[in-house]
Amino acid sequence: MWNAAGCSRRPDVFNETRDARLLRLDRERADLARASSAVERTRIQIRISDLLISFMGDAVADGDMDRVAAEVEEYRSAIFDARDLMMGSGRDPARDVAGYRDLEIALRQQVRQLDDIRTRLLEAFREPLERLIVEVTEIRNELLDALFPD
């Protein structure tokens, strides 16, 4: 099933098997290595970040806090890279929204997913996810400010 949000054609990774998601992650990373434009690379990073959130959820379900921490760091890297790609692209987000809008929409959805994962953790293990949610929200706000400067 495809999610029609934005034009990055984000698959609903939560309905795929872990093996299918691992294969998809490998393909996305290979595509990222070949991609040249900031918008294309950002859209790939969005799809990668969706997969990483699904793996975070798997790790929580398995009670593997080391894996949760590793997925959090990979996700953080993907999102910051996407933000840096767009903000450093030289594109005017108020006039040329491609990439900026895709990332903002994805982050809005992902904050909800991250919060759902956070609530499944014991209180003692929630702090890294809470910090991540704050960071993702800050990036989203930065994108909104760029998209709507007035």
Image (cartoon, helix red, strand yellow):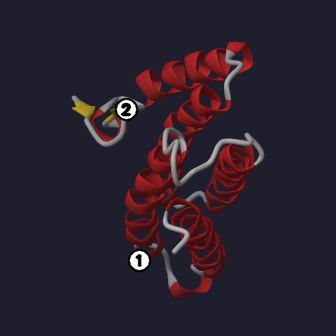
Three-letter residue code for mark 1:
Thr
Q: Which residue is mark 2?
A: 7
| Residue 135, horizontal then vertical, whole percent | 65, 71
The label nearer to you, 2 versus 1, is 2
Mark 1 is surrounded, within 10 Å at the Cα level, by few (under 14), some (14 to 19) or many (20 or more) other residues, namely few
Tell me residue 114's x, y (percent): 46, 65
Q: Is residue 105 above or below residue 23?
A: below
Q: Are circles 2 and 1 on residues that touch, CB within 8 Å?
A: no
Crowding at mark 2 (Cα within 10 Å: few <14, some 14-19, many 20+): few
Q: Give how far apart the Cα atoms at labels 2 and 1 are.
A: 30 Å
Q: Residue at x 53, y 34 (%)?
A: 43
Q: Which residue is mark 1?
A: 119
Tag 2's secondary structure?
loop
Q: In this rendering, would 10 be left or right of 3?
A: right
In what element is the residue under mark 1?
helix
Residue 93 in the image: above or below residue 42: below
Depth check, front residue: 88 or 84: 88
Let me know if residue 57 appears in the view: no
> Can you see residue 94?
yes
Q: Residue at x 36, y 40 (%)?
A: 6
Tell me residue 99's x, y (percent).
53, 40
Tell me the amino acid under the disc marked 2: Cys
**Left or right of 33 in this view: 14:** left
Q: Is residue 66 above or below residue 144?
A: above
Which residue is at the front of the view, 92 or 68? Answer: 92
Q: Earlier in the sequence, mark 2 or mark 1?
A: 2
Q: Quadrant of residue 69?
A: bottom right
**In the figure, is residue 116 to the left or right of 29?**
left
Q: Position of residue 80 (x, y in %)?
A: 71, 53
- Label of residue 130 in the image: none
Q: Choose between 111 and 24: the one closer to the eye.
A: 111
